[in-house]
Image: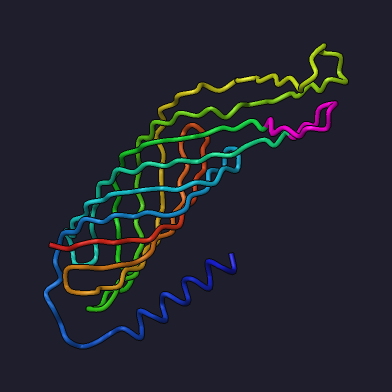
C-alpha cells in the first residue's frame, strides 16, 4: 500500500510540474500497447501481460475503449531427489496458466495537460483460460513403499483445464506526451472474474493519437 501511495504521489508531482499554458488541439483517438509483469493469484504465479487497446474520447475527459490482451504465468513445485548412488535429480512439477481476453472500459482523466495525463478506467471482459495447475499434489517417496526408487506424484484435479469467464477490471494510468501524437507511460491494474481468478499487473505503455 505504501508503494502505491508513493507512486500516486510521484505521478501527481510530475503532472503538476509538467503543466504549461500553451493550448494545443487534443486528438480524440488513440491506439495503445501495454506490456509488463503480471501476478496470478490462483497459484501465486508470476508472468507477463501484453495488451492492445483502442480508445475514443466522447467528452472532454471521458473516453471509452476496447482491448484485447493475453497473459502467461507459470510456476513449479520443487522436488529434488538424490538416488542411492548420490546423483541429484530435478523432479520438479512445472505448470502453466495462459489466457486471452477481450473487454471494454470507460475512462476518466483526473488531470490532463499538454505534457501528460493521469486517469483511471474501469470495465468488463470475457476471458478464455487454459491451465495445467493442479488442485492437489501428493508426493510418495520410495520410503512410502511404492516399490519404485524414485518419487511418485499423484495429481488431483477438481477444476476444469479450460474455462470461459466474465470479469471486471480497474486500471490507473499515467502518460507523458513525447509529441502531440506519441506518448509513453505506465499503467497498474487489478482484475477478477467468475472463475475466481485474481490478477494484478504493472505495464509500460506506448501509444499514438490520431
Q: The N terminus appears in which quarter of the rendering?
A: bottom right
The quarter of the picture where residue 13 lies is: bottom left
* 55 to the left or right of 14: left
Q: Residue at x 70, y 37 (%)?
A: 78
- In this orientation, which residue lies closer to the viewer: 99 or 87? 87
The quarter of the picture where residue 72 lies is: top left
Q: Position of residue 187 (x, y in %)?
A: 39, 60
User: Does the magenta run of residues contain 85?
Assistant: yes
Q: Residue at x 45, y 46 (%)?
A: 191
* 153 to the left or right of 129: right
User: Does the magenta run of residues contain 123?
Assistant: no
**Outermost residue, front side:** 85
Q: Position of residue 199 (x, y in %)?
A: 49, 45
**Outermost residue, top side:** 147
The relative height of residue 118 versus residue 172 in the rendered view (above or below) is below
Q: Position of residue 144 (x, y in %)?
A: 86, 18
Q: Residue at x 57, y 38 (%)?
A: 42
The relative height of residue 16 versus residue 58 in the rendered view (above or below) is below
* 81 to the left or right of 74: right
Q: Position of residue 56 (x, y in %)?
A: 18, 56
Q: Residue at x 36, y 48 (%)?
A: 50
Q: Which residues are magenta?
A: 80-91
Check the image and tell me how it is coloured: rainbow
Q: The C terminus appears in which quarter of the rendering?
A: bottom left
Amino acid at each position: 500500500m505504501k508503494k502505491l501511495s508513493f507512486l500516486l504521489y510521484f505521478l501527481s508531482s510530475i503532472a503538476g510540474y509538467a503543466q504549461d499554458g500553451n493550448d494545443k488541439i487534443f486528438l480524440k483517438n488513440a491506439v495503445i500497447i501495454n506490456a509488463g509483469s503480471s501476478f496470478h493469484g490462483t497459484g501465486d504465479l508470476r508472468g507477463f501481460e501484453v495488451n492492445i487497446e483502442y480508445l475514443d474520447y466522447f467528452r472532454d475527459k471521458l473516453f471509452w475503449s476496447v482491448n484485447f490482451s493475453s497473459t502467461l504465468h507459470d510456476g513449479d513445485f520443487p522436488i529434488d531427489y538424490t538416488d542411492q548412488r548420490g546423483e541429484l535429480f530435478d523432479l520438479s512439477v512445472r505448470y502453466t496458466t495462459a489466457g486471452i481476453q477481450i473487454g471494454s472500459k470507460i475512462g476518466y482523466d483526473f488531470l490532463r495537460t499538454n505534457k501528460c495525463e493521469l486517469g483511471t478506467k474501469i470495465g468488463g471482459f470475457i476471458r478464455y483460460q487454459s491451465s495445467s495447475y493442479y488442485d492437489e499434489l501428493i508426493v510418495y517417496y520410495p520410503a512410502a513403499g511404492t516399490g519404485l526408487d524414485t518419487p511418485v506424484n499423484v495429481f488431483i484435479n477438481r477444476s476444469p483445464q479450460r474455462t470461459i469467464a466474465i470479469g471486471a477490471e480497474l486500471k490507473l494510468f499515467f502518460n507523458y506526451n513525447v509529441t502531440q501524437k506519441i506518448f509513453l507511460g505506465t499503467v497498474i491494474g487489478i482484475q477478477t472474474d467468475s472463475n475466481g481468478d485474481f490478477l494484478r499487473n504493472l505495464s509500460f505503455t506506448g501509444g499514438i493519437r490520431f
